[in-house]
Image (spheres, rainbow, N blue to C red):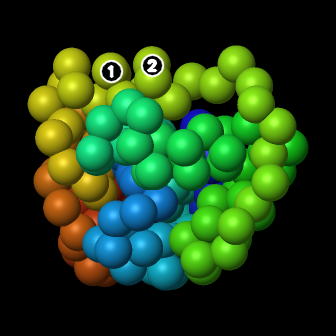
Amino acid sequence: MVIYPAVGETKSHITVFTDTTCPYCHKLHEEVGQLNKMGVEVRYMAFPRQGLGSPGDEQLQAVWCSKDRKSAMDRMVDGKDIKAAKCDNPVSKQYELGQSIGVNGTPAIVLADGQVIPGYQPAAQVAKLAMGAK
């Protein structure tokens, strides 16, 4: 996972299946800071929406193989290339997990109670859903 911790007290958390080539994932990523300030921890799981072996898969592997995954994710979403060594990464396992719970697009937000919310939602709506899912 790539984890963006809540600022102050953690009131809830969400797990987001994401793809660095997904425009709506980028939009949600821009709002992660807001979610963190509202007490929501954001946990990213890799889900290359065009499948394993796709450009998104390669980018996600580079993020997951980086020493600082959070910084690598930020840079990748900002359109900057990152250099990362190959590693035994969990991208394919996370992709399979996403598929097993019905994820078929990104972003897919999983609330603390296991409910899956497909697609982009504004930060305020995500926080409201997250707080209600304890």
User: Compared to 1, does 19 lie above or below?
Assistant: below
Residue nearer the viewer, 88 or 69: 88
Q: Residue at left 74%, top 37%? A: 65
SS of the residue under disc 1: helix
Q: Which disc, if any, is residue 8?
A: none
73 sits to left or right of 113: right
Task: Specify whether residue 10 is in view.
Answer: no
Q: Residue at left 19%, top 49%? A: 105
User: Dot 2: few (<14), some (14–19), or many (≥20) neighbours within 10 Å?
Assistant: few
Quadrant housing the C terminus: top left
Residue nearer the viewer, 55 or 22: 55
User: Compared to 42, does 124 lie above or below?
Assistant: below
- Percent across and percent down for residue 117 are 17, 52
16 sits to left or right of 78: left
Quadrant of res 4: bottom right
- Percent across and percent down for residue 30 are 49, 80
Q: Which disc, if any, is residue 96?
A: 1
Q: Which disc, if any, is residue 93?
A: 2
Q: Hey, what amino acid is under mark 2?
A: Lys
- Percent across and percent down for residue 8 are 69, 66
- Percent across and percent down for residue 133 are 25, 46
Q: Mark 2 near mark 1, Cβ–Cβ under 8 Å?
A: yes
Alpha carbon distance from label 2 to label 1: 5 Å
64 sits to left or right of 133: right
Q: Residue at left 75%, top 60%? A: 82
Q: Hey, what amino acid is under mark 1?
A: Glu
SS of the residue under disc 2: helix
Quadrant housing the N terminus: top right
